[in-house]
Image: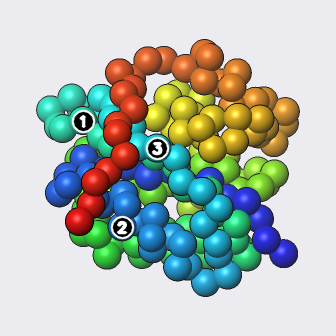
Amino acid sequence: MRTDAFIGLGSNLQEPAVQLARAVAELAALPGTVLVAQSPFYASSPVGPQDQPDFVNGVAWLSTGLAPHALLDHLQAIEQAHGRERLRHWGPRTLDLDLLIYGNRVLNDDRLTVPHRELANRDFALQPLLDLKPDLILPGGTTIASLRAQCPDNRLRRLPPPDYP
């Protein structure tokens, strides 16, 4: 059985847009997984410490046969392959992959909370979700559109499509 999963992507180090584009390709290659679509990329101010570069963010929409924790393990392996270091909470990073939504599942354990616990406060995740699926509804009935309308502004700016060689 396949489940729609939405993965938040973020980077503010080492050519962030390139990091995200590579990560999307790696997500598309996960076992039992198909990339349905990817959002445009956005720039935004960092959450937390402001003494770091702005972030580039987006969302990948996957159809996957992977269970939530198995998908999380793959996401963390991709982050590690991109040189992710967890030196400071909300600090700079080469790549951050967050499982935002996993079908209609609600999970909350020591490793994973789905829907993502900070989703309502992250315009850089909500706007790309709206770009991908404007009628998306969270478990419990809350629409992504209503969350986006109430979300704090994080100086979100849509970036032009990347021009890679």
Identify the residue at image location x=17%, y=37%: 52
Where's residue 78, x and y in %? 40, 72
Identify the residue at image location x=76%, y=50%: 106
146 to the left or right of 46: right
**What element does badge 1 sit on?**
loop
Precedes in sequence: disc 2 or disc 1? 2
Give whichever of 129, 151 is nearer the camera. Answer: 129
Q: Looking at the image, which residue sits at the far bottom? A: 31
Say what amino acid the circle numbered 1 marks.
Asp
Where's residue 142, x and y in %? 78, 30
Q: Which mark is residue 75?
A: none
Precedes in sequence: disc 2 or disc 3? 2
Identify the residue at image location x=54%, y=54%: 38
Say what amino acid the circle numbered 2 marks.
Arg
Which of label 2 and label 1 is nearer to you?
Answer: 2
Residue at numbered disc 1: 54
Residue at numbered disc 3: 40
